[in-house]
Image (spheres, rainbow, N blue to C red):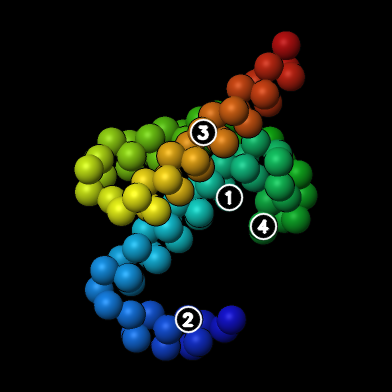
Amino acid sequence: MNEKQIRDMLDKMTPEQKNEMLFMNVVLMFQMSALAQLGKVPNPETHKIEKNPDAAKSTIDLLIMLQAKTRNNLSSHEQNMLDGAIRELQLAFVQETNSYS
């Protein structure tokens, strides 16, 4: 899907639908960033596996802050996605940092 198609799709959505899609996009953006920082996926810019656990911890902390600040204000779908992303990243972080031991 190109940028114009995405923009056209967003323009046809209700404000609630648009906000839900954009929120999930933000969560996914942070999730993919943390996965790259943990070396689980290639860095999208360099296409290389790069590990930066400190940066990953900061990114996970941002998602946890987002979770706290949006408590009781998300749809169940949004909440499930955010909670799942945090759980996945916390587990990956523990696995990655324990592998250094």
Mark 1–mark 3 Cα distance, whole angstroms, equals 14 Å
Q: Which label was assigned to residue 87? A: 3
Q: Secondary structure at mark 4?
A: loop
Task: Estimate the x, y position of residue 59 in percent, counting from the top left.
Answer: 47, 39
Q: Which residue is mark 2?
A: 6
Mark 4 against mark 3, which lies toward the viewer? 3
Q: Amino acid at mark 3?
A: Arg
Q: Residue furthest right?
A: 48
Q: Secondary structure at mark 1?
A: helix
Whichever of callouts 2 and 4 sits on the residue coming sooner in the sequence is 2
Q: Nearer the viewer, residue 31 or 50?
A: 31
Would you call the spot at circle 2 few (<14 residues within 10 Å), some (14-19), or many (20 or more)?
Answer: few
Q: Which residue is mark 4?
A: 44
Q: Which label was assigned to residue 32? A: 1
Q: Amino acid at mark 2?
A: Ile
Task: Estimate the x, y position of residue 78 in percent, counting from the top left.
Answer: 38, 52
- Name the side, left or right, on which 80 lies relative to 41: left
Mark 2–mark 4 Cα distance, whole angstroms, equals 21 Å
Whichever of callouts 1 and 4 sits on the residue coming sooner in the sequence is 1
Q: Amino acid at mark 1?
A: Met
Query: Which residue occupies 28% across, 51% down?
Result: 74
Q: Residue furthest front?
A: 76
Whichever of callouts 4 and 3 sits on the residue coming sooner in the sequence is 4
Would you call the spot at circle 1 few (<14 residues within 10 Å), some (14-19), or many (20 or more)?
Answer: many
Mark 4–mark 3 Cα distance, whole angstroms, equals 23 Å
Mark 1 against mark 4, which lies toward the viewer? 1
